[in-house]
């Protein structure tokens, strides 16, 4: 069977059509949409289609999105579609996958019944003629709709910019993969303006030069670093397109999830003792956060997402969130866990935003380093003495959107939630593991349902 992977950035208008296109093929039993930190409704639109797995990439950039989709895929045969190209009458997935299914190829490129684009004709083909003449047989080397075997794609590099497509073609040639090109019909794409073509050309040329060792490794490339990642807080709050008047914030562990992500990860990866030792140390939360992140070094994004998906959600969380949104609440997560993890929970529940510590990834693998958003750290406006506290982020969001404390709700369970629950207009302790949370909360609930929250919020 075939996995279809659809990297998508701000494609709310076309993503459902592309998903439906993928579903037309009888070969497909898995569809993964990898959202590239869209600021529109791409995720919500994708989730309207049944049987689609939606994840958010760790960095902005098509290459990382493609790689992370590959890591999540459960099949050997993968087809990558473009989220902005929905109009195909034929079964494009079947056309791309067929040479792989028949054992005739390891990697398949698509081409259209039209001339190649300007960058391909003016830049790429002359460079291929000079460095890789064997690749001139391919009509459209920059085509982004491809198919390949997962086992072979894992051996090559995914450049995280416009160079990804030519880079994959060259790398596949270098690992002696059998490459085939198939015609997928006609397509009309928007013509990019010149300034976009200039950036595209630079990145494509860079991908080729890198593969022939004509590359200044000491020079910091404009588009080849993790700083493609948008500033987390600004990105998260941009998702709140409506001007909210009321806000409810949930903790993640034991509140929306029936367990703790880091404890589940410790059990899964075998560092339970090391985690317990760190948590028992008389250190600040800031230092503990950094030490715990090092325990995740070398774990792939897909491994971590699989861990959080193994933890059941509170059974009626989706229903409660929908009702809160109907009542005018913007709903989010503020977590001491990691943004990549909390953001996946946000996608599953349809929340409006999520904020947490930024676990760093390099080529979709955790480096063991963590970046703590400045809004979590103590400043002159802080109402508590902790050096690192959710209440600081809570207060920042309220101020940013002009929401009054009276119109805010915080739901938490642990010691790290005490200040936020105490600060909120309505503080709710849910399945608390700390008596201090119960003491400061306006309401204390226990059980397997979040429904009581609806009874106490306006």
Image: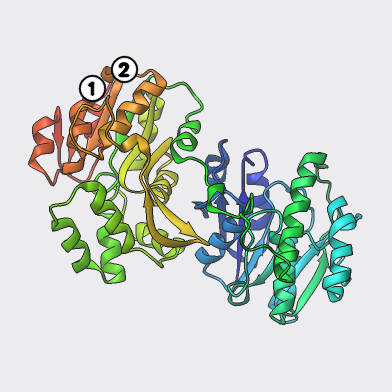
Q: Is residue 298 above or below residue 43?
A: below
Q: Residue at x 76, y 75 (%)?
A: 179
Circle 1 — which element?
loop
Colour scheme of the picture: rainbow
| Residue 112 visible in this rendered orientation of the protein | no
Instruction: Residue 258 in the image: state x and y as whole percent.
Output: 25, 52
Instruction: Residue 367 in the image: state x and y as whole percent.
Output: 42, 61
Instruction: Residue 316 in the image: state x and y as whole percent.
Output: 31, 43
| Nearest to the observer: residue 344 or residue 270 | 270
Q: Is residue 222 above or below residue 327?
A: below
Q: Quadrant of residue 159?
A: bottom right
| Nearest to the observer: residue 188 or residue 101 | 188
Q: Mark 1 highlights which residue?
A: 425
Tell me if 118 is positioned left or right of 199 in this view: right
Q: Mark 2 highlights which residue?
A: 404
Quadrant holding the C terminus: top left
| Nearest to the observer: residue 291 or residue 52 | 291
- Sequence-wise first label, 2 or 1: 2
Give the alpha-carbon distance from disc 2 to disc 1, as whole Å: 8 Å
Classed neighbour count for the residue bearing mark 1: other residues with Cα under 10 Å, few (<14), some (14–19), many (≥20)? some
Quadrant holding the N terminus: bottom right
Instruction: Residue 428 in the image: state x and y as whole percent.
Output: 19, 32
Q: Residue at x 75, y 57 (%)?
A: 204
Tell me if 438 is positioned left or right of 167 in this view: left
Please report contact status of discs 2 and 1: CB closer than 8 Å, yes or no: yes
Q: Residue at x 27, y 34 (%)?
A: 378
| Residue 126 visible in this rendered orientation of the protein | yes
């Amino acid at each position: 069977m075939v996995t279809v992977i659809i990297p998508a950035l701000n494609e709310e208008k076309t993503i459902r059509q592309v998903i439906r296109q993928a579903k037309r093929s009888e070969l497909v039993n898995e569809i993964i949409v990898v959202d590239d930190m869209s600021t529109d409704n791409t995720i919500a639109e994708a989730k309207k289609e049944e049987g689609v797995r939606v994840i958010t990439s760790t960095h902005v950039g098509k290459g990382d999105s493609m790689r992370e989709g590959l890591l999540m895929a459960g099949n050997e045969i993968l087809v990558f579609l473009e989220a902005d190209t929905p109009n195909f009458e034929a079964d494009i997935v079947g056309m791309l996958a067929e040479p792989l299914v028949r054992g005739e190829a390891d990697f398949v490129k698509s081409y259209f019944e039209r001339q190649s684009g300007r960058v391909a004709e003016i830049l790429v083909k002359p460079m291929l003629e000079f460095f890789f003449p064997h690749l001139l047989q391919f009509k459209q080397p920059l085509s982004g709709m491809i198919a390949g075997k997962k086992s072979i794609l894992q051996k090559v590099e995914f450049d995280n910019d416009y160079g990804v497509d030519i880079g994959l073609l060259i790398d596949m040639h270098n690992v002696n993969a059998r490459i085939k090109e198939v015609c997928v019909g006609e397509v009309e794409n928007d013509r990019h303006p010149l300034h976009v073509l200039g950036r595209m050309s630079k990145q494509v040329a860079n991908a080729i030069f890198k593969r022939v060792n004509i590359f200044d490794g000491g020079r910091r490339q404009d588009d080849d670093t993790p700083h493609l990642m948008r500033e987390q807080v600004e990105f998260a709050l941009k998702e709140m397109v409506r001007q909210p008047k009321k806000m409810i914030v949930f903790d993640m562990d034991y509140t929306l999830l029936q367990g703790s992500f880091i404890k589940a990860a410790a059990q899964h990866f075998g560092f339970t003792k090391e985690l317990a030792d760190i948590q028992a140390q008389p250190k600040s939360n800031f230092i503990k956060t950094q030490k715990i992140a090092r325990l995740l070094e070398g774990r792939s994004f897909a491994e971590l997402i699989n861990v959080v998906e193994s933890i059941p959600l509170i059974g009626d969380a989706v229903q409660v969130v929908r009702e809160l949104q109907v009542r005018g609440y913007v709903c989010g997560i503020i977590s001491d866990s990691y943004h990549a993890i909390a953001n996946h929970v946000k996608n599953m529940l349809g929340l409006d935003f999520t904020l947490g510590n930024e676990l760093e990834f390099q080529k979709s693998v955790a480096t063991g380093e963590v970046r703590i958003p400045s809004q979590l750290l103590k400043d002159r406006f802080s109402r508590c003495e902790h050096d690192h506290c959710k209440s600081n982020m809570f207060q920042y969001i309220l101020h940013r959107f002009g929401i009054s404390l009276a119109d805010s709700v915080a739901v938490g369970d642990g010691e790290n939630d005490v200040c936020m629950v105490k600060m909120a207009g309505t503080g709710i302790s849910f399945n608390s593991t700390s008596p201090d949370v119960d003491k400061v909360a306006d309401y204390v609930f226990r059980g397997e349902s979040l429904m009581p929250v609806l009874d106490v919020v306006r």
